[in-house]
Image (cartoon, rainbow, N blue to C red):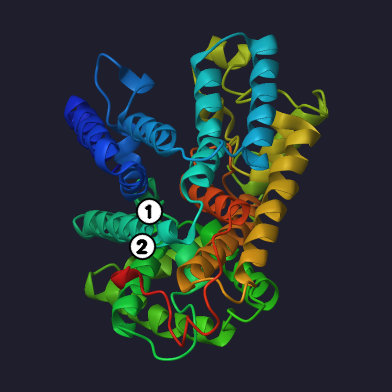
Amino acid sequence: MFGLSVEIGTAFGWLGIGLVLGLGLLLLFFRPYWAFLFGVFILTAAPANANLARTEELGAYFQVGDACVLVMILACLWERKRALLLPAPAVVLSAILTMGFLNGLLHMGLTYELMRSLRWGLIFPLLIFLAANLVQDDRKVRPLLLILVLAGIAAAAQHLLLLGAETNLVEENVGAVRTNQFIQAGTFFWLLAGFYVAGGSIPRPWVQTAIGALFLAGVIAMQTRSLGLAFCGGLVVYYLWFLKGPQAYRWQRFKGLLPIFGLGFLMLAVMGLTAVISGYGERFTKTVEGGQDTQSRWNDIRVELGDWLDSNQVIGRGLDYYEGSKKGRKSGVSLIGRTGVAYGHVGYVTYLSQLGLIGFLVYGFWLPLAILKRSRRLLQQPHAPPETIYLAALTGACFIFMPLCNMMSGSLLNITYVPGILGGAVWGIMAFQSAPVAEGALGPKMLNPTQV
């Protein structure tokens, strides 16, 4: 299935880059913010193809994903009406990544892998910067949330349709479905935050339940156990700690998950994908397997902690140090496949081994706490409109979920779209708060993503 994505991306090539740049630049002249939203949609609706859609001439150096980011940068510069806001996370993370790049450059020289890792890592702080400068009032929140939920629907639908076409593969080898990378549009963030934002009557509840079921079916089909474990842990932290204040409505949010789970399992059964449900359960039992010859979490932790202890413990070994080591270059084989170690797989250890104690403290603790603090303050504002409250809830869910997930899999050093957009939007709203809405203007309503 990954090969299918490569074929689609290669065929897209110049056509995809031309369409993105053409439509994006056209939107810039009329609605710069729409150009930004256009880039957000393409990136989050088809992340695998956006990063694989390339030409033979430009290769991996300028793809459809890069064209989207370029359009978003131009939209930010075009629409700028105030002095540029420099969010602390964007500045601090960029400095940390530059330190890791220079450290790697000093020890390994300039390699493609080193440049690639810097490029991947910078996407996150760049999106924080762009969103913070473009989403600075409540009016811009509603279309942003609409684009994100539509991108989530598109990503989950693509993923399930491809799985439906490969039923035999799913039945014979459930683990193989994890090679599909469509489902990256923050679907677990939506589920954790809950679609129900305020009390009172629920407009179109079945539409929202169906969207939630689609998202749930997509993440179950991904077979990624770290997502499920982070979601379960996030439920406790989110509902018992984060949701406080006059806009919380914790029970209304939580009870919406019950029909979503029922409909989600039914959807998988109807599509003939019941194997992914049982397969997901089996994968959970392998989470803590040990042994030096496996790509288990314990082995990753052991190896990368050893790498960190053998290096400068303050600044680490540098970005992607394992890809550019002399041993790896000499063998011509990826160290991941040769040693059985999934380098970069456990986020907090990855921060230590690549960026040292500095990166570990910044990425692992300061960053999520800084954004959670602002999200929680925004959530507790009694006069904020429903869409802004929902943005705060969604961002809070994101930055509770991500640190938990990164304890087991992945890190913010990889290409990351949705968290950067959400974190930047909250930062921008808090920095330039619009005039409060009159008392009682909200009423017993909620944000309905289908009616934004």
The foreground one among 42 and 142 is: 142
Of helix, strand and loop, which one carries label 2?
A: helix
In this rendering, would 91 be left or right of 134?
A: right
Asked if 83 appears above or below 188 in the picture, the reply is: above
Residue 384: percent from left, percent from top: 55, 71
The foreground one among 288 and 73 is: 73
Which residue is at the far bottom?
200
Asked if 336 appears above or below 183 in the picture, the reply is: above
Q: CA distance from mark 1 to mark 2?
A: 7 Å
In this rendering, would 202 be left or right of 157?
A: right
Residue 36: percent from left, percent from top: 36, 43
In this rendering, would 234 be left or right of 163?
A: right
User: Tag 2: residue type?
Assistant: Gly
Q: Are discs 1 and 2 less than 8 Å apart at CB?
A: yes
Residue 56: percent from left, percent from top: 24, 17
Dot 1: few (<14), some (14–19), or many (≥20) neighbours within 10 Å?
many
Q: Which residue is identified by label 1?
A: 183
Q: Which residue is identified by label 2?
A: 218
> Which residue corresponds to the image point at 20% horizontal and 28% vertical from the top-left?
18
Residue 96: name its quadrant: top right
Q: Which mark is first along the chain, 2 or 1?
A: 1
> Which residue corresponds to the image point at 49% horizontal and 40% vertical from the top-left?
130
